Image (cartoon, helix red, strand yellow):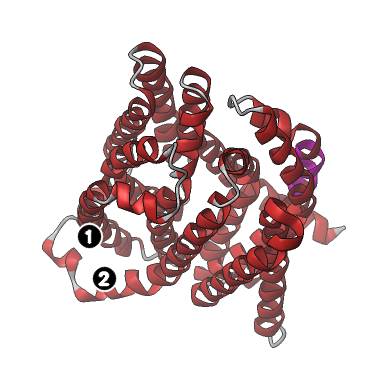
Amino acid sequence: MKAKQNLGPVIKELVSFSLPLILSGVLQQLYNWADAFIVGNVDGELSLSAIGATTTPINFFITTITGFTLGLSVLIAKNFGAGKRENVPPILAAFAVLLCGVFLIAAAAGSLLAYPFMALLHTPPETIQLASGYIRVIFIGLPFLAVYNVYTATLRGIGDSRIPFLSILLSSGVNVLLDILFVAGLRWGVGGAATATVLSQAVMTVFIVLYGSRRYPLLNTGYRKESFCGAVLREGARFGFPPMLQSSVSSLGGLVLQDFMNRFGTDTVTAITTAYRVDTLVMLPIVNLGSGISTITAHSHGANDAAKTRRTLTAGTVLALAVSLLLTVTVIPTGGKMIALFGAGAAAVSIGSAFFRRIACFYPVFGLTAAFRGYLEGKGDLAYSSLAGMSSLAVRIIASYAMAPRFGNMSIAYAEMLSWVWLLVMYLQRFVKTEKFR
């Protein structure tokens, strides 16, 4: 009974911190959902498929940014939990400027090479022009996303998940309104949807910088020459590069998988990319609960509170299992219906329904994986987590090609399920190895 009572405050803290993260993630998905829903119903299935074909290459850049800032968030949370608050502003300033510059260059290169990039992925001929036009505009928003994610990582690291939620709330509203204006009103098609996304990202970034700095004046103190010293950059890189490398490699692997999926034709591309839009939204409670576990673990670990660190894992595991089981029983009967909302045809809906009937059964495995990953990353074990993620990707790619002759396009689902099992085994093995001597 005492153990259960001890878990109560930690569960409350996890829910309180993670709920704004979950809501932020839900709203952030509205960028893609609004584009896909409005374009699919106004311009038709061909335009929907074109936007879907850009998902993986766009995610390569986005996950590179979020991967690096995940490491920064753990570093900031560790310093904040240890009472070293003066270390936070230099990290924010140095990496906001650095990442903005890097992704300005990436945006320019991506816009110039959009068409050959999509051709390299074997994008179907009937959608490649539309897909290239869409992604060319989306690249312009990368510098905004870089700055936004550095500020988000900082705010979450110091325990504030509310301001990132408010910024997403504002930008989601702007995005939907602009989608309606540009796509449904002015009939700009996929280009209008991309323009709406980039403008709403700019609004989101300006809001979080101005409001976050006003709410926490400490964040303004880092923009000084001494913030850009080697020590700050080395420490940030030490925490940021492992998850960034894993995210980048995962996204490159995603390009391989996108190419693999494109070979099954437009119906499969429409079905699976739309299914992943739904799946990404559905999985947000689990993913962001893992982020909450990571942050609270980093705080307590930085403060040398070993008892709370372990209680965070226990409470997080209980919550992750409960949420994932609920998602399983919800998604299996409704997955196909959600795909149909995007204007997908009957063939695509049938493929998507089959995909969900298979993959949703393994959500509890993913839930356990998120809990143990959050715990290990919160304790600073980022390098191992990155290696585990990359090995899981290798399993997924190999399994996709190996299973294709027998299972066809459903090998996409089976391979991902297998990769989750592999990842969970690796995290459990690491947990046992690192904890048995404590």
Residue 219 shows up from this direction: yes
Secondary element at image label 2:
helix
On screen, 172 above or below 11?
Answer: above
The tag on residue 233 is 2
Relative depth, front residue between 134 and 251? 134
**What residue is shown at x 37% (from left), y 11% (from top)?**
185
**What residue is shown at x 29% (from left), y 56% (from top)?**
92
Relative depth, front residue between 307 and 372? 372
Residues in magenta? Answer: 323-331
The tag on residue 244 is none
The amino acid type of the residue labelled 1 equals Leu
Which residue in the structure is indicated by mark 1?
A: 98
- Image position, residue 287 (x, y; %): 60, 51
Relative depth, front residue between 76 and 329? 329
On screen, 230 above or below 315?
Answer: below
- Image position, residue 309 (x, y; %): 63, 67
Query: Is residue 26 found left or right of 168 in the rendered image?
Result: right
On screen, 139 above or below 302?
Answer: above
- Tell me the quarter of the image containing the C terminus: bottom right
